[in-house]
Image (cartoon, grey):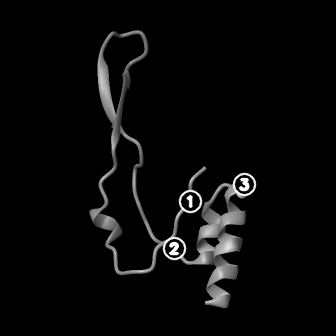
Amino acid sequence: MTGWAVEGDLDADTIVSNTFEMEWPPRSGRMQAFPEVDRAGWFGLEAAREKLNPAQVAFIDRLGELLETA
């Protein structure tokens, strides 16, 4: 897993996802492109804790600790 945080004024509505191709429908022989991410957003630490996979919460905890000492 790779996680990152940023401080700044970035408009999440302007973020554009990469795409990947896969055969769809399955066994049809037809390739289609799909976005890797359906939407982007910025969240505070508490909201991020609720949205993330439980295994990723340690990243938020470490980030919170770093922000307290800054």
Task: Say which residue appears at 69% left-offset and 72% top-offset.
Answer: 62
Closer to the camera in the image, 54 or 67: 67
Residue at position x 66%, y 55% from top? Answer: 53
Residue 23, picture quadrant: top left
Residue picked out by circle 3: 55
Q: Nearer the viewer, mark 3 or mark 2?
A: 3
Report helix, strand or loop for mark 1: loop
Relative to residue 42, is residue 27 depicted above or below?
A: above
Q: Residue at x 72, y 57 (%)?
A: 54
Reply above or below: 66 against 61. below
Mark 3: which secondary structure?
A: helix
Q: Earlier in the sequence, mark 3 or mark 2?
A: 2
Q: Count the marks.
A: 3
Q: Residue furthest left?
A: 14
Q: Residues within 10 Å of mark 3 (few under 14, many from 20)?
A: few
At label 2, counting other C-alpha atoms closer than 10 Å, the crowd grade (few under 14, some 14-19, many 20 or more) is few
Q: Which residue is mark 2?
A: 43
| Mark sitting earlier along the chain (2/1) | 1
Please state the horizontal and vertical placement of residue 3, each as a whole percent of the image: 56, 59
The disc at residue 13 is none
Residue labelled with disc 1: 3
C-alpha distance separating marks 3 and 2: 18 Å
For the residue carrying disc 1, how many other residues have a C-alpha within 10 Å: few (<14), some (14-19), or many (20+)?
few
Q: Nearer the viewer, residue 44 or 3?
A: 3
Seen in the image, is 43 located left or right of residue 60? left
Q: Position of residue 69 (x, y in %)?
A: 67, 89
Instruction: Determine the secondary structure under disc 2.
Output: loop
Q: Position of residue 26 (x, y in %)?
A: 43, 15
The answer to whether the residue labelled 2 contacts the one labelled 1, judged by CB atoms less than 8 Å apart, is no
- In the picture shown, does residue 15 fall above or below 61? above
State how far apart marks 2 and 1 are (Cα): 14 Å
The amino acid beneath tag 3 is Ala
